[in-house]
Amino acid sequence: MDKLTLKDVVLKNLNVLMRVDFNVPLDDSLNITDDTRIRASIPTINYILERKPKKIILMSHLGRPEGKRALKYSLRPVAKRLEDILGQKVKFLDDCIGEKIRREIENASEKIILLENLRFYPEEEENDSAFSRQLACLGDIFVNDAFGAAHRAHASTEGITHYLKSVAGLLLEKEIQYLGETLQNPVKPFMVILGGAKVSDKIGVINNLLPKCDIILIGGGMAYTFLYALNKKIGNSKLERDKLSIAKDILKKGEQLKKDLVLPIDHLVVDKIEKGISSQIVEEIPEGKIAVDIGPKTVEEFKNRLKNAKTIIWNGPLGVFEIDDFAKGTYEVASFIADLPATTIIGGGDTVSAVKKFKLEEKMTHISTGGGASLEFMEGKILPGIKALTDK
Ligand code: AMP
């Protein structure tokens, strides 16, 4: 790792300003419906606390308030939940910059402080330098632990690094280790599982990983544009017509590089994507039918390919897993790789939701906390929030 991390710096008696990802879902009564992201920050917070800083000042965005103050995007409920999880007082401040805030931080008796939503200021997403400097003056050192926001060059992820020594938190370090270093230099055989709704979201990932991997297994909605490109019948399954030529190019490139792109050989099909509807397993998709999951032969084929893998990365569910009847393929492959003696990396977003739904998260080596950020990392892009950290 060529960037400074928390382990490289002394924190004693410093005001540690940390960007976290507390962008949690709230219901209409402003109750937090999933606190995974808050819990994910606890090891980093505890690590810092053990090193006796003066204060830990946490900052985050929540939702898309579009540069305006709005109660429904306040981080106040997050401060309360953080307090409950930590068993320690957390002071919430109703703004994120300014002299008043600076004084309140100085005078607070609490060790941990949470600032109000950064995105109440349009300057945050504009990466405004004056705003970045105002944030920076609240701390002596900057820690970025918000992987989910690392693909955006915002004031609190990039701009601020011009004014403070900037280091990766434990969560960010782990993401860099698995999505960066492991994927750069994977232990082989290295296999990639891709699924999800659209080919268009995964083109960059395929182009980056095809030369590095041994096999790519493709399921989910995106498989049907590839099958159509191979002149297979796909009924009314998901098709991105405008991506057909790209799909053909990818198939050709796979052939040239002698990499197997494994596509579904059977499918669970329905008339309508709807809970409780009757379904059937087919090898050739009849006119009018929609494929919503990979079939049992495909599951066996995928398992057979995956059994010798040493490194596996997975992004995108293999069927419409949100409906239990269509989740079998995703479940079977997830539980199979969970028991393999391989490094298993789950690349963010819906795949993480699926793995959590099956209660398999403890059995995977790494579950990425970022959706868009992990896709961009898998595309081989350098994320601005990581690039901006201080070099070792
Ligand atoms: P993504 O965000 O691209 O990973 O896509 C995830 C979404 O893909 C999930 O909401 C799934 O329901 C959906 N999906 C998976 N398989 C299919 C399929 N065969 N047809 C349509 N949508 C699918």
Image (cartoon, grey):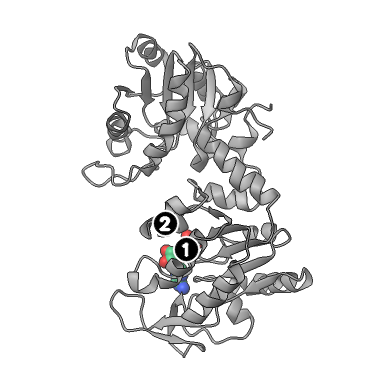
How far across and how far down the image is residue 158, in percent?
A: 58, 31
Residue at (33%, 16%) from the top-left corner? 110
Residue at (27%, 31%) from the top-left corner? 84
Q: Are marks 2 and 1 in contact (CB under 8 Å)?
A: yes
Visible residue check, residue 102: yes
Quadrant containing the C terminus in the rendered view: top right
- Label 1: which residue? 334
Pick the residue in front: 185 or 129. Answer: 185
Q: Which mark is residue 360?
A: 2
Vertical side of 255 occupied by 20: above or below:
above
Residue 102 is drawn in which quadrant? top left
Quadrant containing the N terminus in the rendered view: top right
Q: Residues within 10 Å of mark 1 (few under 14, many from 20)?
A: many
Instruction: Answer left or right for 378 relative to 350.
Output: right
Farthest left residue in view:
29
Q: Secondary structure at mark 2?
A: loop
How far across and how far down the image is residue 370, in percent?
A: 50, 46
Residue at (49%, 37%) from the top-left corner? 146
Residue at (55%, 49%) from the top-left corner? 374
Q: Quadrant of ligand 1?
A: bottom left
- Badge 1 amino acid: Ala
Cα–Cα span, label 2 and label 1: 8 Å
How far across and how far down the image is residue 55, in percent?
A: 42, 16
